[in-house]
Structures are given as structure tokens and as C-alpha cells.
Image (cartoon, rainbow, N blue to C red):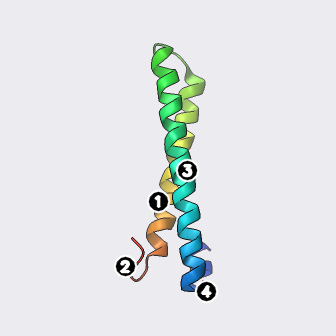
Amino acid sequence: MIATYQKNMNDEEKGKRFLKLIDDQNNIQWGIVAKLTTLISSGWNSQELKNEIETLVEDHTEITKELNSLDDKGSIL
């Protein structure tokens, strides 16, 4: 679905989407750092934080996949 949508995007739309994804990815990375810091402070005893980190990492992976698929010509990255 995403790939089909992206094929119909022009270069300007791809550029805007790329910048949005980079911003989202950066926010997720900071979220991961914050959660890890809190988890370490808790003595690694919070299953809730572990689950939240797992979800953030999954989100980060999906954004990375989409970023890579946007660069079909090898020109943005």
C-alpha cells in the first residue's frame, strides 16, 4: 500500500515526506533514550518500560523502511 502511494508521489512530495519521517524518527530516538534512562534508573525492573521501548523500536524500524523505500532513485539519502 505504501509503495503504491509513494510511486504516485512527485519529488517535492517525496522530499516533504522524507523530512517528516526524519523528524518522526528523531523524536522516536529521543523517546527511546528517555525510556532507557528511566529503565536503567529503575534497576531494569519495569516491564511497562521494556514494552514501551519495544514499541518505539518497532516504530523506528517501520519509519526506516519507509525512508529507504522513498529513495527509489538513490537521490535523497
Mark whose residue sits in front, 2 or 3 = 2
Along the viewing direction, whichever of 21 and 49 lies nearer the viewer: 21
- Residue carrying label 2: 74
Q: Is residue 44 visible?
A: no
For disc 3, the marked residue is: 59
| As drawn, 11 above or below 19 | below
Can you tell which quarter of the image residue 12 is in? Answer: bottom right
Q: Which residue is mark 4?
A: 8
**Marks 2/3: CA–CA distance:** 23 Å
Q: Is residue 2 visible?
A: yes
Q: Amino acid at mark 1?
A: Thr
Q: CA distance from mark 2 to mark 4?
A: 17 Å
Mark seen at residue 64: 1
Disc with the residue nearer the chain's start (1 vs 3): 3
Q: Position of residue 60 (x, y in %)?
A: 50, 51
Reply above or below: 66 against 42: below
Q: Earlier in the sequence, mark 2 or mark 3?
A: 3
In the image, residue 22 lies at what x, y percent? 51, 59
Q: Is disc 1 in contact with disc 3, using a CB cutoff of under 8 Å?
A: no
The alpha-carbon separation of the residues under discs 4 and 1 comes to 20 Å
Q: Residues within 10 Å of mark 1 (few under 14, many from 20)?
A: some
Q: Quadrant of residue 21?
A: bottom right
